[in-house]
Image (cartoon, helix red, strand yellow):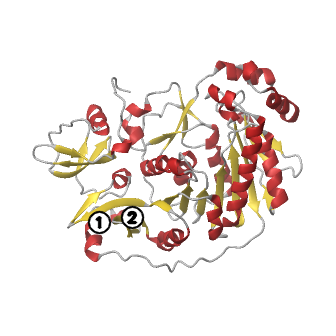
Amino acid sequence: MSNKLPPALIKSLKEKYNIEEELFFEVHEAEEAITSIRLNPLKPITEFEQSELIPWTSQGRYLAERPSFIADPLFHAGCYYVQEASSMFLEHILKQNCDLNDELRVLDLCAAPGGKSTLIASLISQNSLLVSNEIIKTRVPVLTDNMTKWGVLNSVVSNNDPKDFQRLEGYFDVMVVDAPCSGSGMWRKDPETVNEWSESNVLLCSQRQQRILADAYPALKEEGLLIYSTCSYSPEENEDIADWLCDTFKLETVKIDIDSTWNIVQTESPKHKCFGYRFYPHKVKGEGFFVTCFRKKDGEEISFNARTKSQKPVKQDLEIVESWLNMNAGALKAMPVKDGYSIINQGHWDDIHFLQSKLYLKKSGVFAGKIIGKDLIPAHELALSLIVNERVSRAELTYDQAIAFLRKDDLRLNDAQTGWNLMCYQGFGLGWAKVLPNRINNYLPKEVRILKEIKDRK
């Protein structure tokens, strides 16, 4: 592997950041697989209690070996997310620079597949609102699926170009831009990507990163926090972007306090001395990563007008929908969407209608389902949420039954009540099934079912 690494980049890293070339080569040649997960604090489990903690995040864990996640019903229930350890540093930044008890509006601009969004959702208060945006349409389903698994109410998923956010001037308190990049930080994890790397692609990525930042920048309010990150080693995509930001906008660099034992390398950009944080795999137990952070020093908060025409809920429908909900889970409100109802925090009613008038929203809160006649056909999102009324019938599945349900294989249950049942594993919802006298209808969406044959228990 060492002779495959681009000499120009290695030379640049040596000259500018004094990296230990030999150790850097060694760690890439070893191709050691680091497996890390982040637990969902809203769906607590004990499975990984003995695992090694990731020091810069409260819920992150290193696993001694990589299990078959696809064979674990708790993974499908959203009890944890498989995420690269270095990128979880976002939690440390947010805790240092935001009052997470405040009512914050947070934008995750390049959000798929959902690692940073699920992390943010774990940290912010119920009264805060997270907008998880993905620019590329084909990547939106995986983002939506991961946000659904996480089970939170206070988030929306959008599919918009960064320039569309100019319509939301001064709206967000925090903007996270984990920008598309040349990907050199992933070389150890995915050695094949070394062959795809080129200096011309780095410059192309740098130009794209500038466009993304410039397009979305107006949506951040004055004194708002901008967090920019990549999984690239190239200064053109990292420190040089920080300098470009300060050349172009009125921004103040933010220094992050870090523990010296973490071996994260603090850098300063050449022109404006902006603080940056580099993660190298020969120094940290994680992949290559860069992050820098700023406060916006101009602009103003714009008051928004949410008086958009919104469909009124039908009273009889509301009674049906609410009978499925745990109304003690907070101030919940059913919002008509298309041919069904989404459940949102009551305090987000105006925000979500405002966002709907400016953006293309793929998902708002938790979609409860559709009303057919006098019945609710419950949605998969509702099954994975934390707002299902305890009076709704549940079927607790064994491991083998859970896998059969997730594969949409024939399922036999002896004690399940007739009618709708929330299929659960260790108490956590996996999806819906309708139990009939002679069969069970599995309502798990076909796009999330397990296709692989599961031979042995995880």
In this picture, is 302 found above or below 419? below
The residue pinned by badge 2 equals 343
Residue at the location (87% across, 52% down)? Answer: 272
Mark pair 2, 1: CA separation = 9 Å
The local secondary structure at tag 1 comes to helix
Left or right position of 404 against 412: right
The quarter of the displayed image where residue 368 is located: bottom left
In this picture, is 326 found above or below 16? below
Quadrant where the C terminus is found in the figure: top left
Mark 1 packing: few (<14 Cα in 10 Å), some, or many (20+)? many
Expressed as whole percent of the image width and height from the top left, the position of residue 445 reads 33, 47
Expressed as whole percent of the image width and height from the top left, the position of residue 263 reads 73, 34
The residue pinned by badge 1 equals 321
Name the kind of residue labelled 1 in the image.
Val
Residue at the location (80% across, 41% down)? Answer: 235
In this picture, is 307 found above or below 67? below
The local secondary structure at tag 2 comes to strand
Left or right position of 356 against 213: left
Residue at the location (25% across, 74% down)? Answer: 316
* In-front residue for pair 113/78: 113
Circles 2 and 1 in contact, beta carbons < 8 Å = yes
Quadrant where the N terminus is found in the figure: top right
Name the kind of residue labelled 2 in the image.
Ile
Expressed as whole percent of the image width and height from the top left, the position of residue 410 reads 21, 36
**Between disc 2 and disc 1, whose residue precedes?**
1
Residue at the location (61% across, 22% down)? Answer: 32
